[in-house]
């Protein structure tokens, strides 16, 4: 039994493409004392993963050439030499893009307890995507009932969750997404009050129509021209939560854009970056609430599940091409739920 | 007896120059019931005044062509038809660039109570400049003891006050100013721990030396290349208080600069604009504290007093040329203190 691994082959400039990875067959890892062997069922594909590869200063050391691509994954314990885990446990953590991972028991992120919900949710709405939406919106954006909330990549795993939380808070929600399908998803599935297709509409003009009183909170997943347009519509005391920069192909050198200072001054507005990992102590709180919202239908989610590890190398590039509808996952083995 | 007035003659693109104003002799205003007649002693010259002239969306309606230039001023009541004021009262408010102003008693900002301190302080360290430093630093920058505070236009009326408040809070203070004289002033008069002359030094390199652990709080009066350099040195959780944009000649069209999103993301940092007028309810609190600091020598201030209204038309442009050392005032009549 072999372990297929997606390894980093070359360091990309900008968005990682298929050619920067290779799929290698490796032997099954030996289990050391204190370790568990995990059969990965779902691999996560996240926009943030490009940041784990690039060499420019980031949150953590970049994945080395030849190393298995770092990623979140959820799977089943196949063997355990750790007292806290038994065979059959469903777990999630940084298990990498591979069939099997041998990891220290302590580095398993958690045992999955929401057995009534699909395992895939552990990587999306009940995982980092949901937490990112939850903490970014509530802690950084701090919307109040009646305020106008604008979200970019609004049909995505994070953006759709942000919009739906905004709806429950009583905000007017406006989603910006690329393409007619995603716009429709925003309106019909995720309940945004208005949606803008930035590919076919003039964002500036559409925002003026969708946000006649201006924008109180902007949850920014893109940076770039979409954000430039939103900033022009900020209201007094507005808050911009910077979550991601999907529209920026690369940060070295730093790309130019319109300066933001005057918007922030005149509108007494705030731009603030955040990283979900800073809220790790409160993940359980967020997960409990998000699971409740998923169960009662307050939050809907979409997934796009690619069937097989051979989809992995091109999967990040595909996110940046905007081709996915919903949280992108790669499935390696059957899930029981 | 005539009233010399500095009126707006033409609307500038960018920084207002001498030719955009004209000095006109007008008749003394008639006093209506409820009004007071004020003999202006000091006129204020503030960088923010350019924003009161330009036609682009700002905080308030722009000064009209032919109108007296809006400004803060301090003076003496010469005649009163308002029960709260008597002849001889020293007052401060928006009296404009003119010898005499007839204003409604209600629109007088305050009667000056710090009779032991020079009247000129009412327009600087005990006026908007001091309040701007006080609220911008404490409310927006929120520095803590031991943190590193960087200030641009550090030798100016606001910046010097920011640095000195930072010193009392136990911050490491680093001032950025233009020219050797201002740098020396920062170090010798205002007590900054380090100072950078952006005209003769590479700001990026000098910052790395002056802030080896990074920048926790940046009080930004300039925007532009100085800010671009500071942003590269932000520390985790840094706060940028955007107070002014002195280095930007004009905002229409919005000038380009390096995008800030990634700095804010990676550093979980915040940029926030503020306008001192939003703190008007708390001016008395700030003034009491600032006056205490001035009296006990904690805060020193510099003034540059131009003698005569004929200096007014070029005075704002001069600020942006960086030619003043300290708070710029125009004196029209003798002050008793």
Image (tube, coloured by chain):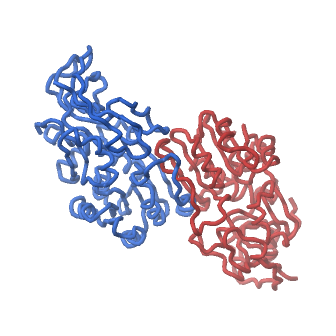
Chain colours: A blue, B red
What is the quadrant of the N terminus of chain B in the image?
A: bottom right
Placement of the C terminus of chain B among the 4 image quadrants: bottom right
Q: Is residue A131 above or below residue A78?
A: below
Residue A264, x across and y down, in percent: 54, 59
Q: Left or right: B243 with respect to B331?
A: left
Instruction: Work out whether A107 lies above or below A332.
Output: above
Relative height, residue A244 to residue B304 (above, below): above
Residue B85: quadrant of the picture:
bottom right
- Which residue lies most toward the top here? A33
Residue A289 drawn above or below residue B85: above
Q: Say whether residue A21 is visible.
A: yes
Q: Nearer the viewer, residue A274 or B260?
A: B260
Front in this rendered view, residue B271 or B259: B259
**Residue B263 screen position, x and y as percent:** 51, 46
Task: Identify the image quadrant of residue A95.
Answer: top left
Question: Which residue occupies 69% across, 81% down?
Answer: B65
Instruction: Give percent across and percent down for residue B207.
Output: 66, 40
- Image-based side of A53 in relation to B73, left or right: left
Residue at the left extreme of this rendering: A336
| Residue at the limit of the structure toward the front, as seen here | A19
Which residue is at a point 59% across and 43% down the rendered structure image?
B217
Where is residue B69 drawn, in percent x and y?
A: 73, 75
> What is the total number of numbered labels drawn onto the structure image?
0
Name the one closer to the observer, A337 or A215: A337
Q: Is residue B80 visible?
A: no
Which residue is pictured at 37% across the width and 60% down the height?
A149
């Amino acid at each position: 039994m072999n372990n297929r691994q997606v390894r980093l082959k070359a360091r990309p400039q900008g968005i990682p493409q298929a050619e920067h990875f290779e799929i290698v067959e490796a032997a099954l890892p030996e289990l050391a004392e204190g370790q568990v062997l995990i059969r990965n069922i779902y691999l996560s594909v996240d926009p943030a993963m490009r940041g784990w590869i690039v060499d420019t200063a980031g949150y953590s050391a970049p994945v080395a050439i030849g190393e298995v691509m770092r990623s979140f994954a959820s799977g089943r314990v196949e063997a355990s030499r750790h007292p806290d885990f038994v065979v059959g446990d469903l777990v999630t953590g940084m298990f990498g893009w591979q069939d099997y991972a041998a990891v220290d028991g302590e580095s398993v992120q958690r045992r999955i307890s929401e057995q009534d919900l699909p395992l895939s949710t552990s990587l999306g709405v009940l995982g980092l995507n949901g937490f990112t939406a939850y903490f970014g919106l509530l802690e950084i954006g701090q919307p109040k009932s009646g305020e106008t909330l604008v979200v970019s990549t609004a049909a995505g795993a994070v953006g759709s969750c942000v919009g739906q939380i905004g709806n429950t808070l009583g905000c007017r929600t406006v989603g910006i997404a690329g393409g007619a399908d995603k716009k429709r998803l925003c309106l019909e599935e995720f309940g945004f009050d208005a949606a803008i297709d930035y590919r076919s509409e003039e964002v500036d003009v559409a925002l003026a129509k969708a946000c006649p009183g201006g924008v109180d909170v902007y949850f920014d997943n893109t940076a770039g021209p979409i954000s430039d347009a939103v900033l022009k519509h900020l209201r007094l005391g507005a808050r911009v939560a910077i979550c991601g920069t999907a529209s920026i192909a690369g940060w070295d050198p730093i790309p130019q854009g319109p300066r933001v200072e005057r918007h922030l001054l005149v509108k007494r507005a705030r731009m603030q970056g955040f990283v979900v990992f800073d809220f790790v102590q409160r993940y359980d709180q967020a997960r409990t609430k998000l699971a409740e919202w998923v169960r009662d239908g307050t939050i809907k989610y979409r997934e796009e599940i690619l069937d097989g590890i051979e989809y992995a190398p091109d999967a990040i590039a595909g996110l940046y091409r905007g081709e996915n509808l919903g949280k992108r996952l790669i499935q390696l083995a059957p899930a029981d739920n």
